[in-house]
């Protein structure tokens, strides 16, 4: 938990944070052993987050004024619930700031947004080897949905499939 005199602050990201957000994304990818998958750059993140019609949003966590982590999220929709929700794409706290309540503060903030906006759910994925995160999420009340498998189509597979003639 934070030291009694430490200050945690969560603030909306600004265009000036694009480089910081890219650094966080890169650090998260390294932690997850997925650095080879990072194709984003600061300019692309800035355009996505702060362009004319942003569809993704971010908050920055600071600890005693130092950038310590972030959350990146977007709105979803559940046809079963008939309501929008939020998907957390990234929730990351730098190693030196872990155990100080920043992850919980970020998660509480986005949960409060869901409730305030009357959204139906808050969802995210976690790597199955990240037992520390899994325990944290379960302690917060999250359910692991083992009956679901993530499907992804990207790159050449996406291009190839999109070019195929529809079968009737």
Image: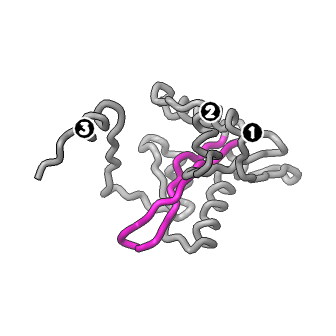
- Residue identifier under label 3: 163
Residue drawn 79% across and 45% down?
63
Label 3: element kind = helix
Asked whether residue 98 is drawn in magenta, I would say no
- Mark 1 = which residue? 16
Q: Reading the chain from its start, which is encountered first: label 1 or label 2?
A: 1
Task: Name the residue that disc number 2 marks.
Answer: 43
Q: Residue at x 32, y 55 (%)?
A: 148
Q: Residues within 10 Å of mark 1 (few under 14, many from 20)?
A: few
Residue placed most toward the observer, 4 or 84: 84
Q: Farthest residue toward the left?
A: 168
Q: Position of residue 92 (x, y in %)?
A: 61, 43
In percent of width and height, residue 61 lies at: 72, 48
Q: Is residue 80 left or right of residue 10?
A: left
Tag 1 near tag 2, CB within 8 Å: no
Q: CA distance from mark 2 to mark 3?
A: 29 Å
- Measured in 3D between alpha carbons, the distance from the residue under mark 1 to the one under mark 2, in whole angstroms, is 11 Å
Q: Is residue 32 left or right of residue 11?
A: left
Chain part drawn in magenta: 69-93
Residue drawn at (37%, 69%) of the image: 79
Q: Nearer the viewer, mark 2 or mark 3?
A: 3
Asked if disc 2 and disc 3 are in contact, CB closer than 8 Å, the reply is no
Q: Which residue is pictured at 65% across the width and 32% down the height?
A: 23
Q: Is residue 151 above or below residue 122?
A: above
Q: Position of residue 28 (x, y in %)?
A: 57, 36
Of 38 and 164, nearer the camera is 164
């Amino acid at each position: 938990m934070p030291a009694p005199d430490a200050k945690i602050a969560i603030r909306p990201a600004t265009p000036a944070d694009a480089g910081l957000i890219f650094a966080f994304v890169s650090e998260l990818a390294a932690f997850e052993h997925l650095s080879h998958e990072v194709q984003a750059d600061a300019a692309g993140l800035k355009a996505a987050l702060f362009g004319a019609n942003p569809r993704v949003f971010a908050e920055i966590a600071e600890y005693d004024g130092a950038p310590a982590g972030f959350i990146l999220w977007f709105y979803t929709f559940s046809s079963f619930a008939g309501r929008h929700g939020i998907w957390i794409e990234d929730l990351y706290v730098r190693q030196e700031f872990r155990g100080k309540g920043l992850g919980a503060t970020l998660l509480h903030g986005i949960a409060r947004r869901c409730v305030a906006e009357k959204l139906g759910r808050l969802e995210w994925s976690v790597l199955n080897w990240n037992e520390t995160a899994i325990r944290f999420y379960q302690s917060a009340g999250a359910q692991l949905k083992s009956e679901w498998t993530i499907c992804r189509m990207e790159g050449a597979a996406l291009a190839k499939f999109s070019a195929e003639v529809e079968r009737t």
